[in-house]
Amino acid sequence: MLGNNHPAFRSSGELTAWHCRPTMLEGASSFHTEEIIQINAERVVLNNSRVHQGNSPSHVQVNAREYHHHEATASSLGLRELYRHIASGALHNSADRFDAPKCHPETRKAVQEDILSWAGYGNNDDDPMQLLWLSGPAGSGKTAIMGTISDKFREEGRLAATFFFSSVSGSTDRQSKRRLVTTLAYQLQQQQGLEPHLSHLVSAAIRKDPAIFDKNLKEQMEDSVNDHAFPFRVIISSRPEHHIRHFFTTLPANYTAQIFLDDKYQPDDDITLFLSSKFAEIRRRYDHLPPTWPTESNIRTLVERASGQFIYVATVIRFIDTPPKLPQDQLNIVLKIRPPEGTNPFASLDALYTSILMSSPDPHETVLWLRAYLILQRAYNSWGNVSVRMPAWIYDRFFESTAGQAQMLLQLPSLVHLVELGESKTISISNATYALYHKSFPDFLEDPRRMQRLPGHP
């Protein structure tokens, strides 16, 4: 198996016209000059195309008993080059997002209908607003809504491209913007209607400047797609951070539509449906639980504490459904938590996180390790274009002073889980990395005011 640098495919000082990967030569001998490349072999298989880069030889001669040459188009070469620089975990249907939250059936219908209406469903196809900003506070269900909408658009052939950022994912590429443009371009180039035109632009941009992948995002966008005809509508989902809000206020009023996830969309009703469905699933797995478990009063209490935050009830369900502990015992622990009074919108969520951390054998050490994990993740993310995904066992070696200590202290399945690094039938600390379920948890860990009820923290 020979790559591009094999002597049979080089002329003096210049890359020749053959860009071969893979190339198979059996029983081969070869020689080359500035003008001629000759290959003598019993079998030659070339799977890539002739790509003229620099000065190519005037004559190529192949003597073989068997010869296969599979021509590839410039678009396929551009697609392969793009693939080397994308964040594959950011695709809506990637393996990295296999357990990503989705809207439960019969929930979030109103906001989905508003998004579909803006996107041209029904009688709103002529809406001039090409950009939609979906925003809401932490834990309000933005990621689940976007995942569900992406699935719907894809089923109908209307999904052009997606990029799901995540600061708590196992994939460092999803925590950075550096691969945003290439990931979008990679998906757009696979669209049937766009492929002939876009593939030419992408391939030409790469040939013109191979360093384009190291340029800033503005230049990448201009060099890859520079067409005034823009046949897309774009949805951006985020928290209502000040700098993001400022950006949207600078756009023309008739260009951007906005949806904010507030009480208008009746989150309490959706949260009640979600809890009722999840508790029914748990009862089906545990025969000893009566059909009256939990009580309507229990569900009302959880809905009130959620305050519209789906992440609260999602964490509660994960905590309750943690074998080998019994669900009714776990629910009783949650119901006994008393959130502090005050104006903190995350009081119930913080109290829940605190209670779960307190269930660790050593809460203080566990918090220190989790915060160290966040620091390491942030350091990996700052290493330029290098994508680093450390196996869980490496983190364990960093943190533990006694073998097995890390596993004991990080037994928090409702907060921390393993994400596989490669294809494997089983997930273990050697072939997977740690990941957190939601951005609200590291927010909690890095805010001393929110952690004040944990021992050892002011």
Image (tube, rainbow, N blue to C red):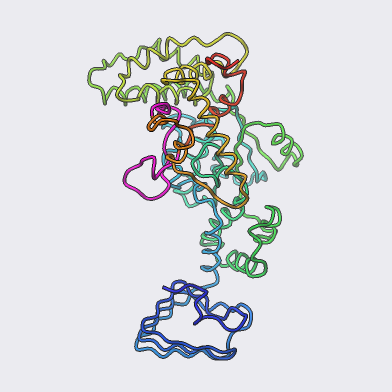
Does the magenta-highlighted stretch encompass residue 278? Answer: no
- State the image quarter where residue 52 is shown: bottom right
Q: Nearer the viewer, residue 314 or 107?
A: 314
- Please give left or right for residue 293 compared with residue 272 in the image: left
Q: Is residue 92 above or below residue 403?
A: below
Which quarter of the rendered picture does the C terminus lie within?
top right
Q: Position of residue 278 (x, y in %)?
A: 36, 25
Residue 43 vertical placement versus 139 (above, below): below
Q: Is residue 430 magenta?
A: yes
Q: Position of residue 365 (x, y in %)?
A: 49, 24
| Quadrant in the picture for the N terminus | bottom left
Which span is picked out in magenta?
Answer: 408-433
Percent x, y of residue 289: 26, 17
State the residue lying farthest toward the left.
Answer: 287
Q: Nearer the viewer, residue 136 or 363?
A: 363
* Rendered location of residue 429, percent (x, y): 39, 40
The overriding secondary structure of the stretch rendered in magenta is loop
Question: How many numbered marks, from 0 up?
Answer: 0
Residue at image position (48%, 72%) is: 3
